[in-house]
Image (cartoon, grey):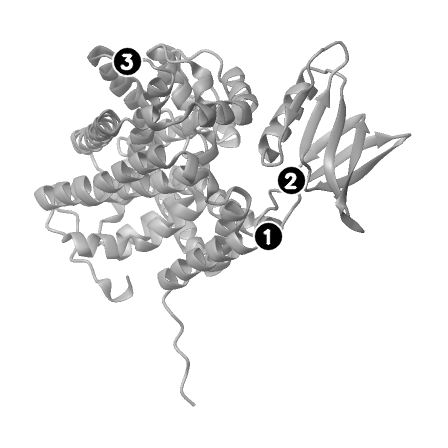
């Protein structure tokens, strides 16, 4: 009996991406329904309203009633959150709801003591927990892998001079590519001028919809002090750094420990290095096991994203999204191949074949940290990069190399300035490049954190911070795209640095 040959894993993941997008678009969250929870007596009851013509908030002592139309589901939810935060009492009056038995007759519903207003769930969003498990499994091994790999990598570099040489090359590469990425974003944003193409109505709608979320992020940011950020790289307590998941502190401690292990006697250092080497190999092997559920996890994540946000939001921010995506494509498929051609002997097609699994995982998880174990495995097995280089370059890159995020921040800053009619001069745009480069170093490799760093950039050039509300609707979708650029840059850096150190083997793509 002939055995059925299953498609390769990267083909399964790609199929899961496509099928997840289709599933999410079919079984999406209903834009015409709202679930209202309210206090009745001593219990909380729930009602579902559908097909309203007008949704009104009546606030005692306020003459004007705040009204929303039938297409303003997200605005209603956001405004309710604002009222709850301000602890204001209010009533809700909903008119134009058709009676089930007679579509020609409309009724009015009123609600008091409202606890929450939310969207109704859908099958596509209900299965998101499966994708969350997949992300947590990858994230679970990220910190021990970074710690073990960086410690072994720093120790295996042998001496201080080699450590300084490779470290200097790595940081220089990451900083230079980040500056190039931001510059590409700024040039495209200035040429296309996406902010000037947004209508006044769309601007008002975006601001009203996401102002509450924007305000909460601005409040949670606090003050940003570059000198304090540098001081904070050194952990007071390494154990606390591990429990808090502070990647920069973990990296500092790991590299420092590895460096010290290379300075003490081999008899004393060898057992520790072997232990960390075994731990690193165990984490890489764990990736193989976790990746067995990758197609299912990817399907759940993509279907939930498309099901909740859909593609409608792209229509209102099409020019902004297009500039970001085009910029990411230029950097990913233009800049990196040029650098690989100049500084390594690996062909572009060989490189992209070797990391296609990395890119699909990055797109679905939106997390460089969660993708790190997969990136290390692919660079070693598919591209022939030595373990000592991947162990040092990739964990460092997952934290300080955020080319995609930096490019997006450059475009977003100019876009928001254009919407508000602010003309950024050359000095201000240079400030954006410097600030975004520094901010990217401290950006945690997790979904959504780029929006926090963007606030810092907006502050640096005097752009209204509340402008982030204009772009938050598409942030999740663009986050998925820019993570591909982030991890591709990490892999390209590993190949380039390994080539310069003659620590790259001829890649065997029979299993790529």
Q: Position of residue 510 (x, y in %)?
A: 24, 67
80 shown above or below 96: above
Mark before the other along the chain sequence, 1 or 2 = 2
Q: Position of residue 504 (x, y in %)?
A: 17, 50
Give the Cα distance between marks 1 and 3.
45 Å
Give the Cα distance between marks 3 and 2.
39 Å
Indicate which disc residue 423 carries: 3
Residue at numbered disc 2: 119
Q: Position of residue 109 (x, y in %)?
A: 79, 34
Mark before the other along the chain sequence, 3 or 2 = 2
Labels 1, 2: front one: 2
Front-most of residues 206 and 102: 102
Residue occupying the point 38% across, 58% down: 14
Q: Element type at marker 1?
A: loop
Q: Element type at marker 2?
A: loop
Residue at numbered disc 1: 127
Indicate which disc residue 323 carries: none
């Amino acid at each position: 009996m002939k055995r059925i040959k299953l498609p390769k894993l990267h083909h399964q993941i790609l199929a899961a991406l496509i099928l997840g997008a289709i599933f999410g678009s079919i079984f999406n969250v209903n834009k015409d329904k709202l679930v209202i929870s309210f206090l009745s007596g001593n219990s909380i009851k729930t009602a579902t309203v559908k097909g309203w013509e007008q949704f009104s908030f009546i606030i005692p002592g306020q003459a004007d009633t705040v009204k929303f139309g039938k297409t303003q589901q997200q605005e209603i939810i956001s405004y309710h959150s604002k009222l709850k935060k301000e602890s204001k009492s209010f009533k809700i009056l909903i008119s134009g709801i058709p009676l089930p038995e007679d579509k020609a007759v409309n009724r009015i519903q009123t609600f008091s003591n409202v606890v929450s207003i939310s969207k109704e769930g859908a099958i596509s969003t209900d299965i998101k927990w499966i994708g969350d498990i997949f992300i947590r499994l990858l994230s679970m091994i990220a910190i021990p892998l970074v710690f073990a790999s960086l410690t072994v990598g720093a120790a295996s570099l042998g001496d201080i001079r080699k450590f300084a040489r490779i470290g200097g090359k790595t940081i220089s590469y990451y900083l230079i590519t980040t500056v190039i990425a931001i510059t590409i974003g700024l040039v495209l944003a200035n040429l296309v001028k996406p902010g000037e193409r947004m209508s006044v109505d769309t601007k008002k709608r975006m601001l009203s919809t996401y102002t509450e979320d924007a305000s909460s992020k601005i409040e949670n940011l606090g003050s940003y002090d570059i000198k304090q950020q540098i001081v904070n790289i050194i952990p007071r307590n390494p154990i606390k750094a591990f429990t808090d998941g502070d990647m920069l502190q973990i990296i500092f401690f790991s590299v420092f420990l590895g460096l010290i292990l290379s300075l003490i006697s081999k008899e004393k250092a060898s057992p520790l290095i072997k232990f960390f080497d075994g731990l690193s190999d165990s984490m890489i092997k764990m990736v193989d096991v976790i990746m067995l559920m990758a197609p299912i996890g990817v399907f759940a994540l993509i279907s939930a994203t498309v099901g909740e946000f859909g593609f409608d939001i792209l229509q209102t921010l099409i020019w902004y999204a297009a500039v970001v995506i085009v910029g990411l494509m230029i950097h990913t498929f233009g800049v990196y191949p040029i650098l690989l051609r100049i500084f390594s002997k690996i062909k572009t097609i060989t490189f992209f074949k070797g990391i296609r699994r990395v890119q699909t995982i990055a797109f679905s998880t939106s997390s460089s940290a969660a993708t790190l174990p997969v990136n290390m495995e692919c660079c070693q097995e598919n591209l022939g990069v030595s373990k000592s280089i991947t162990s040092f370059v990739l964990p460092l890159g997952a934290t300080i190399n955020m080319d995609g995020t930096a490019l997006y921040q450059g475009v977003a800053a100019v876009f928001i300035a254009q919407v508000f009619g602010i003309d950024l001069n050359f000095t201000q745009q240079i400030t954006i490049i410097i600030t975004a480069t520094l901010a990217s170093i401290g950006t945690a490799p997790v979904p959504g954190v780029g929006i926090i760093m963007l606030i810092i950039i907006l502050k640096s050039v005097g752009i209204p911070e509340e402008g982030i509300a204009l772009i938050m609707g598409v942030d999740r979708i663009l986050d998925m795209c820019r993570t591909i650029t982030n991890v591709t840059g990490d892999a390209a850096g590993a190949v380039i640095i390994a080539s310069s150190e003659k620590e790259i083997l001829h890649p065997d793509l029979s299993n790529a």
